Image (cartoon, grey):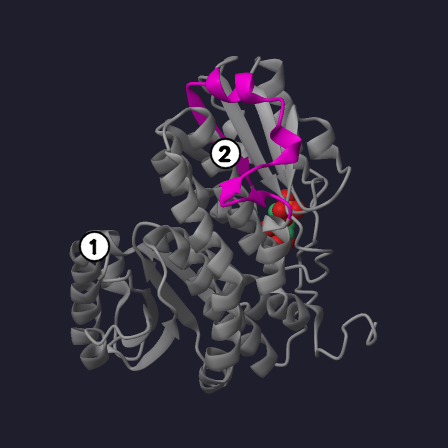
Amino acid sequence: AAAEKGGWSSFMAKEVSEEPEAVANTLRGRIQDGAVVIPELADLDDLFTGIDRIIIIACGTASYAGQVGAYALEQWTRLPVHVELAHEFRYRDPVIDERSLVVSISQSGETMDTLMAVKYAAERGARTLSICNTQGATIPRESDAVVYTHAGPEVAVASTKAFVAQITAIYLLALHIGRVRGVLSPVEAAEHVRELEAVPGKIKRILDTEQEHTTQLAHWMADTRSVLFLGRHVGFPIALEGALKLKEISYIHAEGFAAGELKHGPIALIEAGQPVFVLVPSPRESSLLHDKVVSNIQEIRARGARVIVIAEEGDAAVLPFADEVLRIPLAGPLFEPLLAVVPLHIFAMGLATAKGLDVDQPRNLAKSVTVE
Ligand code: G6P
């Protein structure tokens, strides 16, 4: 097993270090002259022009990739997109028909809850597309189409590199559908492709520059009993993912909230010393969103929270209110989640390690849950 870890202390450490390649390999062979060309989808234009809604189903970390992906899918295809946990989906008589595309996301391709939801959707006449990391797994075999993520085998129970690969694959899918439906111009699509192609290098930079500080922070916080995560827009599902990772491997109570929801309840949790991660959107594209999150930071700081900010390089507005600042490179708003999640993965891993826990094999969890 030591050899399989390639010198890393854990599979999780190895897999986080592979996040740049997970994105790069998922893009590989799918971009030609700045345009998205997905060979697997070549003959499916009728499918994509014949739908009037998209429903994303998944469980766990894959569902947060779906929540991130939904923003891009909706923006680039102008189709209504709805994200749902697979095990909730089929118990409420959902409105689906042959004009619905059900996109499932699963690293293993064997998650029973997700598989049953895909079968249910197909029985109701919906079209099904699987985003999957495992060649020939059951879910892609049961689907009309598949876009594989190429993150490579993921061994650690908590998903990391598969998550960034899943977001990458949905973005490719969204660009493809946006072009097929004539919503995106070639120029617009090429701009987004350029952003995607820059992601691996930017993740690498975060691993190079922020890993030590983030791990240090995690060690200082080894006795922490609860951590909160706040995000807005695409930062919201990243807050949820940051909290899930911490629950999964460090057994610490953690919650993610939409920053705008703070005043509607969660702010009551804030007391002196409460650590809160805040994902700050770039001020360049939307100063409105940025400023709202900064005022959230002021609100919790005033109540004694210990604020750890994830903000883009050069954003000085956060400095007066942050106890710690983790930096991510500049990117378009929809591409920030692929960067901001990296310090959160490092943090969860660092904290579990500081507590002496087995980060690869957390208690009570299985890599692939093949029962309902
Ligand atoms: C399990 C794992 C999670 C994973 C989820 C979905 O619960 O512990 O890490 O996110 O399944 O797995 P999938 O293979 O469908 O992506």
Q: Residues within 10 Å of mark 1 (few under 14, many from 20)?
A: few
Q: Is residue 144 shown to the viewer in this render?
A: yes
Give the structural element (helix, strand or loop) at label 2.
helix
Labels 2 & 1 near each other (Cβ < 8 A): no
In this view, 250 is above or below 236: below
Amino acid type of the residue that numbered disc 2 sits on in the rendered structure: His
Residue positioned 62% across, 61% down in the render: 21
Residue positioned 75% across, 80% down in the render: 7
Find residue 176 and name its label: 2
Of the 4 image quadrants, the one containing the C terminus is top right
Query: What is the distance, in whole Å, between disc 2 and disc 1 at their CAs?
Result: 26 Å
Amino acid type of the residue that numbered disc 1 sits on in the rendered structure: Ser
Q: Is residue 159 shown to the viewer in this render?
A: no
Residue positioned 33% across, 81% down in the render: 324
Camera-side residue of 270 and 164: 164
Query: Which region shows up in magenta?
Result: 29-58
Is 30 inside the magenta-drawn segment?
Answer: yes
Q: Earlier in the sequence, mark 2 or mark 1?
A: 2
Find residue 286 and name its label: 1
Find residue 312 and name its label: none
Camera-side residue of 306 and 130: 130
How far across and how far down the image is residue 237, in percent?
41, 51
Of the 4 image quadrants, the one containing the N terminus is bottom right
How far across and how far down the image is residue 212, in percent?
50, 84
